[in-house]
Image: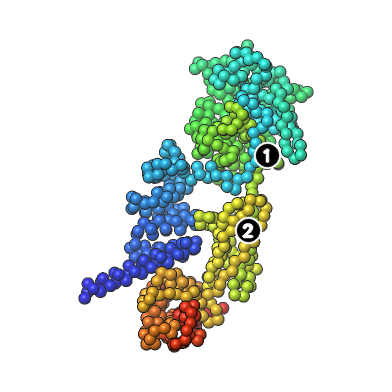
Amino acid sequence: MKNSLLYILFFFTVSITTAQIKVADNFFKDYAYYQATELYLEVLKKGDTTEHVLTRLGDCYYNNSNVQLASYWYKKAVTKYKDVNPEYLYKYVQTLRSLNQFEESKKWTTVFKDRKKNDRRVKEDDVFDIEKFEALESTDRVYVDFQNLDINTKYSDFGSFEKDNVLYFASTRVKDSLLDEEKIYQWNKEPFLDIYQSEISIEDGKKIVGSPSPITSNEVNSDFHESSVAITKDGKTMYFTRINLNNKNKAKYDKGGTSQIKLFRAKNVDGKWKKIEELPFNGEDFSTGSPALSPNDKELYFSSDREGSKGLTDLYKVKINKDGTFGNPINLGDKINTEGRENFPYIAKDSTLYFSSDGHINLGLYDIFESNILKKDTLEVYVKNLGAPYNSGFDDFAFFINNDTNTGYFSSNREGGKGGDDIYSFGRYECKQLIKGTTRDKISNEPLAKVVVTLLDEKGKVIERQTSNENGEYEFKDVGCDKTYTILAEKVIYRPDSKDITTSQESGEETIVDLFLTPLIIDSEIVINPIFFDYNKSNVRPDAAYELENIVAVMREHPTMTIKIEAHTDSRGRDAYNEKLSDRRAKSTRDYLYTRGIEPDRIESAIGYGESQLINGCSDGVKCTDEQHQENRRSKFIITGGYVK
């Protein structure tokens, strides 16, 4: 007898646990992650540590952007279950990356790679960050018009700087009809780099770059390399890069056979660049190049591999004194510089630093990055990869932007270009839209205040939450174009409402989404959808438990509320049997509420009335449809006290 009782209790516990998981799954499906979390945690306390429960807990926190707890539950799942779905390994790696646990993420990235060898999200290097890589590839919410300039040639053209409607850039294009072998750079069998300029005009609202010509000076361009221009705001001083030359204007090589590059300064004299001078912080055994000026022209930024550099080349800055002399070069530090190459700095008018690097996470080779490191009152320095379409799997570098027009240039040797390196012009904007609406009581149609409205992406991840104002109004600004969202409205003692929408591709459009919440309390009754029982059964099914959670929510919101439960059947079957069956169902419903923490003294009674209180004419002998009989099969939750509107 004792063993039988234990078996019954065990079976009963398992049944309740299984039912709660199904209820939690329903909440999860409806994006109700908080409710789902509570139920999954309850199941966990009862000893259920299945892969499903652990990974679902991880997903609940992941979709609510609680990376710490998501990582905690994913870890339990992936360490306990060796054959866990690889997608949870993937998500676990992402949470580790977000928590800066890079060594651990490398370990699990390897596991993920072993499970999904052909997955395009993985590469050969161990430090590869899957989620960031996908984000960099994506052009979602990035709207950029860019084009390969007509001035590009089959040779290398790169390094743009725009000043007073003139575009300055470097090019290996052929100046003469015949190529002198001494004027060929043996590295790439192209002519040496020179600095060129093109007049810029506006025609029909579009920027037109005119035919290039060598820079207006016989002193800047030599028979060897010159490139990378930066010009002061007053247009009187230009900084540029040149290969190291000896007194005979021939390339000068160091002991290792390398001709280093150096920075030079030129003055504008009657429209021509004259008075060329080498900057004092160059060196004979290291390179210094790629000049960039701060917005106030008081600092010069550059790239160098001098002693003290963290990597192959680092970014530096040096103060420009009022008398034209310079301070000591200062390394920009570990936030910017890596063990790889950092080069081509540019500082925009808003003090954003742009540069190229192959050491930070990238799509391949050089990528263009931005950082706030130079901005005043910066609390936390960031380095951000600009992603596609600026960056590709090739070299992308030499970024320039005009903050006033949001237009600029970058250079790339990506596929589809005209030559080795090409210059691309761009105009960028964000396609933003507005989603707004009103939350209303579905029965009265009156605006409903203090409704929690959630914007979710197509994967169910929470993007933003708001609470509707006293007029029931809400709005989500800066919503992405051409994307699918779910708008979910929730308020305690109301049944939630949700709608799926897809935004258009036009920036600035508004989408009106009104949401209608059905009150759970009508007059003196808590009204929920019909709860169903299996034929001749009284146990609470998961779909019924899902509905009963509305009763739990209402009674938690009103902690002094008391109710009585009534269960009714239709007229089919024997009267006495229907009364006993409905009574068992009423008490089973009551017992479920007990398991959810509702105190026994708050449920005054749970009585089944069988077919004694039909609400239509479908009595014995009367022919009715299934829908009409269904009206009589109902449970009622009548408020008996403790409720104040």
Callout 1 amino acid: Thr
- State the quadrant of the C terminus: bottom right
Q: Position of residue 201 (x, y in %)?
A: 75, 34
Between residue 458 and residue 171, name the one nearer to us: 458
- State the quadrant of the N terminus: bottom left
Q: Taking the image as drawn, is residue 626 in sight? A: yes
What number is the disc on residue 435? Answer: 2
Q: Quarter-wise, where is residue 10 in the image?
A: bottom left
Q: Residue at the spot x=51%, y=35% of the render?
A: 364
Q: Residue at the spot x=63%, y=53% of the render?
A: 504
Callout 2 amino acid: Ile
Image height of 308 relative to 121, above or below: above
What number is the disc on residue 407? Answer: 1
Image height of 548 relative to 640, above or below: above
Say left or right for 629 vs 52. right
Q: Quarter-wise, where is residue 151 in the image?
A: top right
